Image (spheres, rainbow, N blue to C red):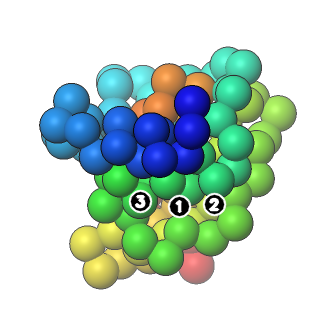
Amino acid sequence: MSKEEYAALCGATAWAENTPEKGAPFEGANSFTEEQAIDRAVAWNVTEVSALTKDDQGIWRGTGMANGAAVSVAVDYKGNVVTSAAKP
């Protein structure tokens, strides 16, 4: 899939709700590249997304801004974007 195709898919109405599945982020083999994970977070209205690091559970993690507040960001292999208040 090209970057353009992925970006178009991220903007599709199928993901407009921007609500992660209950229990997310899920551990699993994550095939997203860092750039794709950042694009996914941005599509879910997270801005100023930092560089992301994939942890040993296959979850991309970093920081960003959501609704004007600093947040921790996690993107799982299913594409769920989970934000939580950033730790000081």
- Which quadrant of the rendered structure holds the N terminus? top right
Mark 3 vs mark 2: give the one in front: 3
Relative vertical location of residue 18 with respect to residue 57 in this rendering, above or below: below
Query: What element does badge 1 sit on?
Result: strand
For the question of whether residue 18 can be seen, the reply is yes
In the picture, measured across the screen, residue 32 lies left or right of residue 86, that is: right
Q: Amino acid at mark 1?
A: Ser
- Distance, label 3 to label 2, CA atoms, is 13 Å
Mark 1 highlights which residue?
72
In the picture, measured across the screen, residue 51 lies left or right of residue 70, that is: right
Residue 19: percent from the left, percent from the top?
Answer: 26, 38
Mark 3 Cα shell of 10 Å, populated few (<14), some (14-19), many (≥20) = many
- Distance, label 1 to label 3, CA atoms, is 13 Å
Q: Residue at x 69, y 66 (%)?
A: 51
Mark 2 highlights which residue?
62
Picture mark count:
3
- Say which label, 1 or 2, has the lower sequence index: 2
- Distance, label 1 to label 2, CA atoms, is 6 Å
In the picture, measured across the screen, residue 57 lies left or right of residue 24, that is: right
Mark 1 Cα shell of 10 Å, populated few (<14), some (14-19), many (≥20) = some
- Asked if the residue under mark 2 is in contact with the one under mark 3, i.e. CB atoms within 8 Å, the reply is no
Query: What element does badge 2 sit on?
Result: strand
Relative vertical location of residue 73 with respect to residue 87 in this rendering, above or below: above
Q: Residue at x 30, y 80 (%)?
A: 68
On residue 42, the disc is 3
Residue 5: percent from the left, percent from the top?
Answer: 45, 38
Residue 2: percent from the left, percent from the top?
Answer: 57, 39
Q: Residue at x 42, y 24 (%)?
A: 23
